[in-house]
Image: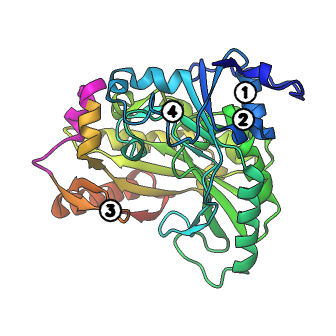
Amino acid sequence: MTDALTLFDDLEPAETPVDSRLLQVRTVYAEPAAAASARGRQVLARFPDAELVEVPSHWQIPDLHGNEGNVERWVRVKTETLVLGVKKAVSVRPNGRSADFIAPSTANGCAMACAYCYVPRRKGYANPITVFTNIDQITGAVRRHVGRQGVKPEPNECDPVDWVYDLGENSDCSVDALVSDNVADLVATFRTLPTAKASFATKFVNRQLLDLDPQGRTRVRFSLMPDADAKLLDVRTSRVDERIAAIDDFVEAGYEVHLNFSPVVLRDGWEADWTALLRQLDDELSGAAKAQAATEVIMLTHNEQLHEVNLGWHPQAEELLWRPELQQPKVSQNGMRNVRYRNDVKRAGVDRVQELIGQHAPWLRVRYAF
């Protein structure tokens, strides 16, 4: 192990160390090329007290991946560990409902610990942030892909005018922006692309993003659920009231701001709590925010492997998430064996959420619900 900053004599400019309850990084695992890159050195400078451990690949870290003992240290690993890697595949993939395309990831994993998050299913027993340092390759791939698309020929549920590119498929961009300038670089990239816009969902209010001048080319989707659910399931995130309070500020700063009702968890009293949330939105959001708002409604999907992991660190969450009497198996597009609400239960839930929106927030357009 080596003190991260002793490896490089030309760390310029000096970075301000990260001051966040989410991240008190003690160890950075890094591929050599990632640590030596400009972006990697920036990350290391933001965590000057961290020790650097060289690894051959960000996917091959025995202390993290496949180490079942990390279940009991689930949150501590997220707090104290970062990984630096080089993104090998920088291709853009087609998407569907939420965005037209998925941009190459600039990070993987998260410092937050939402109990229903699907990312840990691939990474074994630990899920800290991995930062991909080859940001220029990633933004270059996005620019070329946007250029090949030309003008969007017709409206769809993603956007009536622009091609929409989802960022942060496997991370939360608001938290990623604490660690590096990758998100700032993506926002700046889309600011110059007149036929496309970026989009990312978040559960963390990072007011540093207000200074990035997106000029309407980045859509932020604040994920919301009733506070009673969030306190149990959205571990280490910004509170729901704080997310709602930030919406007007992000609209004023030049972001398009949508909502993301995800996941909708069915349990006793859920309709009353969703009614209260919708009324709060109706009471607190400005006319400007309401005029451009839209939402996605996504019912809970869970996973048996994640269920077993959660039992090791947060069993209370599984009392809401694991409901065999209401759920059925589902094989996802990427081949994962998940569980979701039975077809009849899910259909009734989707219909009821949309009814509540119509009653209590009629200004809120539902982009899609499933």
Among the two numbered marks 4 and 2 on one chain, the one whose residue lies closer to the N terminus: 2
For badge 1, the amino acid type reads Leu
Looking at numbered disc 2 in the image, what kind of residue is underneath it?
Ala
Q: Residues in magenta?
A: 311-326
Q: Are marks 1 and 2 in contact (CB under 8 Å)?
A: yes
- Residue 338 appears in the rendering: yes
**357 relative position to 324: left or right:** right
Mark 2 nearby-residue class (10 Å; few <14, some 14–19, many ≥20) = many
Q: Position of residue 97 (x, y in %)?
A: 47, 67
Q: Position of residue 357 (x, y in %)?
A: 39, 55
Q: Mark 1 highlights which residue?
A: 44
For marks 1 and 2, give the CA distance.
Answer: 8 Å
Question: Which numbered mark, 2 or 3, is in the foreground of this view?
Answer: 2
Could you classify mark 4 by the number of other residues whose Cα lies within 10 Å: few (under 14), some (14-19), or many (20 or more)?
many
Residue that numbered label 3 is attached to: 335
Residue of label 2 = 35
Is tag 3's residue or tag 4's residue first in the polypeptide sequence? Answer: 4
Within-10-Å neighbours for mark 3: few <14, some 14–19, many 20+: few
Q: Which label sits in the foreground, 4 or 2?
A: 2
Q: Is residue 314 above or below residue 244?
A: above
Residue 175's quadrant in the figure? top right
Q: Contact, CB < 8 Å: mark 3 with mark 4?
A: no
In the displayed structure, would residue 63 be above or below residue 263?
above
Q: Residue furthest left?
A: 325
